[in-house]
Amino acid sequence: MNLVAENHNDHIESIVRAVLKPVGSPGIYAQTGLFEQVIEGLTVFISRRREPGTEVWKFPPVMSRDQIQNSGYLQSFPHLLGCVSCLDGGESDIRAAVERPDWIGGLEATELVLSPAACYPIYPLVAARGDIPTKGLLFDAASYCFRREATYEIDRLQAFRMREYVYIGMPEPVLNFRTRWISRAAEMATQLGLPHRIAPASDPFFGRAGRIASISQLEQSLKFELLVPLQSETEPTACMSFNYHRDHFGTAWALRTAAGETAHTACVAFGMERLALALFATHGVELKNWPAAVRKSLLL
Ligand code: ATP
Ligand code: ZN
Ligand code: MG
């Protein structure tokens, strides 16, 4: 019997139709006022849990190509990266280019890429400041992100908003940061009335060598995700992730602790659209029918 599954998919489809409108490209949607209201509620909900002493940064949806390269992204996820290309030159060059049917052949790569995650610009910012204080550093980062995914289901977008808390410091407090955010995140999902579980995870590293990197990431418990059944019960959707990078960014950016050791880093990431979709899928598209406690938590 897959009646239940079909009904579930119909339910999700009708929810998506009510809050997201396709605008001509897969994985790209216009978002309704109602959807945005929920995103705003979630933004405040997450901000309220910010730890004392956290520095807040908002980043544009583009970042330095050199920085993303130095971060190792090109080796790990070249298939997901989007670069900004423009028509360069004087008026006559540009005029000639746009009049050719194959004008895209005239595009030149710029020094910019589309940000694939919110935390990447933090590490070079911190590197420019000198040593990391003994107690470590906490950051709150937000950015619109882009990923050229292999497929676009309703919860897998090309462009989406990511919010992150980041800690930079000694290995033990870095791990403690991640541990307390895993339990805090589970409490947050409960407060939002979302069915969820936390599970070990790995990143979709590129190619054959990438599969080995994914296995090693799992073996070392470097990544966990908070999963919510959105499209399917058997393949729930990652709405948050908890990542321990060890000394990856510390080495890439020569981040040193006051004791002279390479700093370790961790981040907790919230997928804003996925969380909003999970709320709509769970509670419906009529805010007035949502549990009172959930509405209160989100100021709705
Ligand atoms: P997935 O396993 O579903 O591809 P991911 O491991 O690539 O997710 P992260 O790199 O950990 O995700 O990104 C942090 C969060 O950003 C995810 O937990 C998710 O909520 C959100 N996110 C990631 N990719 C997308 C996407 N293509 N569309 C919408 N949200 C996304
Ligand atoms: Zn991150
Ligand atoms: Mg992914």
Image: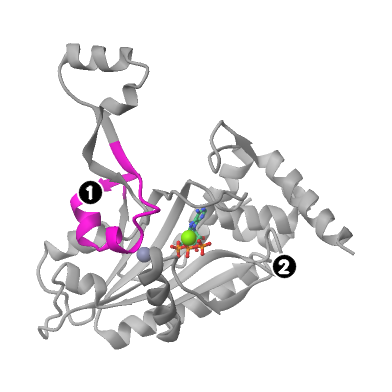
* Label 2, residues with CA under 10 Å away: few <14, some 14-19, many ≥20: few
Residue 111 at x, y percent in the picture: 20, 42
Q: Element type at marker 2? A: loop
Q: In this view, does 107 lie to the left or right of 198?
A: left
Residue drawn at x 52%, y 60% as measured from the top left: 45
- The residue closer to the viewer here, 80 or 230, is 80
Q: In which quarter of the image is residue 131?
A: bottom left
**Which residue is outermost to the bottom?**
172
- How many numbered circles does the render carry? 2
User: Which range of residues does the magenta coloring cover?
Assistant: 59-84
> Which amino acid does the dot numbered 2 rest on?
Glu
Q: Element type at marker 1? A: helix
Q: Is residue 186 left or right of residue 78?
A: right
> Does 188 sit above or below residue 290?
below
Q: Mark 2 points at which residue?
A: 233
Q: Mark 1 points at which residue?
A: 65
Residue 241 at x, y percent in the picture: 47, 69
> Which amino acid does the dot numbered 1 rest on?
Arg
Examine the structure image and report whether residue 64 is included in the region drawn in magenta.
yes
Q: In this view, does 25 lie to the left or right of 114?
A: right
* Label 1, residues with CA under 10 Å away: few <14, some 14-19, many ≥20: some
